[in-house]
Image: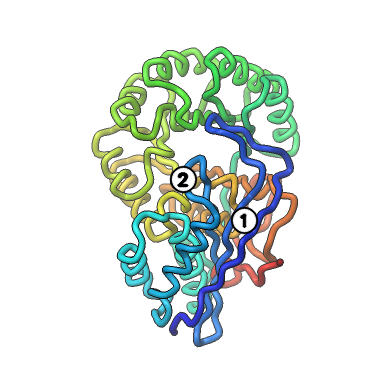
């Protein structure tokens, strides 16, 4: 089997409501959808969703990078994942979003060629996983009302954005806890919004509201600060922006700088690198979460969900981006059970039958 063409389709879908985080505002899901065609008639689908606030990439650059990679990958067997990734790394430095799009499509082809759904191909621990639902930054009462609505709709875990004013963050979390009651898990994501010492003091105060974990409390480059917060926080600390690839994961777990790691395919470059991160973390006794970019349309969510369900060391999921879209650009893929469970398809690969334009 050989790659004959790699086609790109730019997509921009409005979110149901603007999504605010400490770094800025997101209004649309902006993605490059990919089709990898082969000489045996098997087509693989992928997605690269650049998140400028997190990865520093944009849609035009992602599309152009994929076109560059197309020249190097045409004629290769898409099932040879090691070879494909080696060629991509030699052709382009970094560019995790573009590599993720191709990586996902190659995994889709591998599943189809072997007649296996992707979750079985990747490990097969389960065919479903529970996702949380995220509440963006806003006034405390507005966030509390949204969180309550999500719980009433069936979600059992609320992830709320913080990192925009200490007293406001306290008011936000207090209001959400009062709104959702005691039985709902609450996760916090500061998106690098605090400094180390203030983070420790704030987390101690926030712990009154029974917090499950705090994600990326300090700037991504502040390794020592992250290590300090982890050491002195009464709540488990999760790395997100501080962990881009397997090398970052190795450093973080070797020095016990975090309790948990959030993996995103758009950061690390796809399933190939994500599996390395999971293995490194598992060897160190550190559990992982599968996360997503707010800009993802759902194809990448399918791939992330497959990995999250497949491997036992991925114990949490934050794969709610597609719930915020007014429409999905594809047919097939995962289904929803009881509002919060993503159920993986039994069809080969991603289970996506076609793209819609």
Q: Earlier in the sequence, mark 1 or mark 2?
A: 2
Q: Quadrant of the C terminus?
A: bottom right
- Whole-percent x and y of residue 156? 64, 36
For residue 228, above or below residue 89: above
90 or 320: nearer the viewer: 90
Q: Quadrant of the N terminus?
A: bottom left
The structure residue drawn at horizontal position 63% and vertical position 68%, both measured from the top left corner, is 352
Question: Which residue extends farthest left?
Answer: 254
The structure residue drawn at horizontal position 49% and vertical position 63%, both measured from the top left corner, is 64
Q: Is residue 115 visible?
A: no
How many numbered marks are there? 2
Q: Which mark is residue 298?
A: 1
Q: Secondary structure at mark 2?
A: loop
Q: Is residue 341 visible?
A: yes
Q: Is residue 68 left or right of residue 6?
A: left
Q: Which mark is residue 237?
A: none
Q: Secondary structure at mark 1?
A: loop
Q: CA distance from mark 1 to mark 2?
A: 21 Å
For residue 67, above or below residue 32: below
Q: Is residue 157 left or right of residue 275?
A: right
- Whole-percent x and y of residue 330? 68, 64
- Whole-percent x and y of residue 150? 71, 35
Q: Is residue 275 left or right of residue 16?
A: left
Mark 2 is surrounded, within 10 Å at the Cα level, by few (under 14), some (14 to 19) or many (20 or more) other residues, namely few
Write down the residue under mark 2.
56
- Whole-percent x and y of residue 339? 70, 45
Q: Nearer the viewer, mark 1 or mark 2?
A: 2
């Amino acid at each position: 089997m050989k790659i004959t063409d790699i086609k790109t389709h730019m997509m921009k879908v409005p979110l149901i409501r603007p999504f605010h985080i400490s770094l800025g505002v997101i209004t649309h899901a902006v993605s490059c959808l990919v089709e990898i065609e082969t000489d045996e008639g098997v087509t693989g689908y992928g997605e690269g969703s650049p998140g400028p606030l997190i990865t520093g990439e944009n849609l035009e650059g992602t599309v152009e990078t994929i076109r560059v990679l197309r020249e190097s990958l045409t004629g290769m067997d898409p099932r040879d994942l090691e070879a494909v990734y080696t060629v991509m790394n030699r052709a382009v430095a970094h560019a995790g979003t573009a590599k993720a799009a191709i990586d996902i499509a190659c995994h889709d082809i591998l599943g189809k060629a072997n007649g296996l759904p992707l979750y079985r191909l990747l490990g097969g621990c389960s065919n479903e996983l529970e996702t949380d639902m995220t509440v963006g930054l806003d006034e405390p009462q507005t966030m509390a009302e949204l969180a309550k609505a999500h719980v009433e709709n069936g979600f059992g875990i609320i992830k709320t954005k913080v990192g925009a004013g200490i007293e406001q963050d306290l008011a936000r979390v207090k209001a959400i806890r009062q709104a959702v009651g005691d039985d709902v898990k609450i996760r916090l994501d500061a998106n690098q919004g605090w400094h180390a010492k203030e983070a420790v003091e704030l987390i101690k105060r926030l712990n009154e509201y029974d917090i499950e974990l705090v994600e990326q409390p300090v700037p991504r480059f502040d390794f020592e600060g992250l290590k300090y917060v982890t050491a002195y926080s009464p709540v488990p600390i999760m790395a997100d922006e501080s962990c881009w690839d397997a090398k970052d994961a190795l450093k973080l777990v070797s020095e016990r700088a975090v309790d948990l790691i959030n993996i995103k395919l758009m950061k690390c470059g796809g399933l190939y690198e994500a599996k390395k991160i999971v293995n490194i973390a598992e060897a160190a006794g550190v559990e992982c979460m599968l996360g997503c970019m707010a800009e993802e349309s759902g194809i990448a969510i399918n791939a992330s969900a497959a990995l999250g369900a497949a491997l036992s060391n991925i114990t949490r999921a934050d794969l709610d981006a597609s719930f915020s879209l007014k429409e999905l650009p594809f047919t097939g893929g995962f289904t929803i059970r009881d509002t919060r469970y993503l159920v993986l398809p039994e069809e080969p690969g991603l289970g996506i039958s076609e793209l819609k334009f």
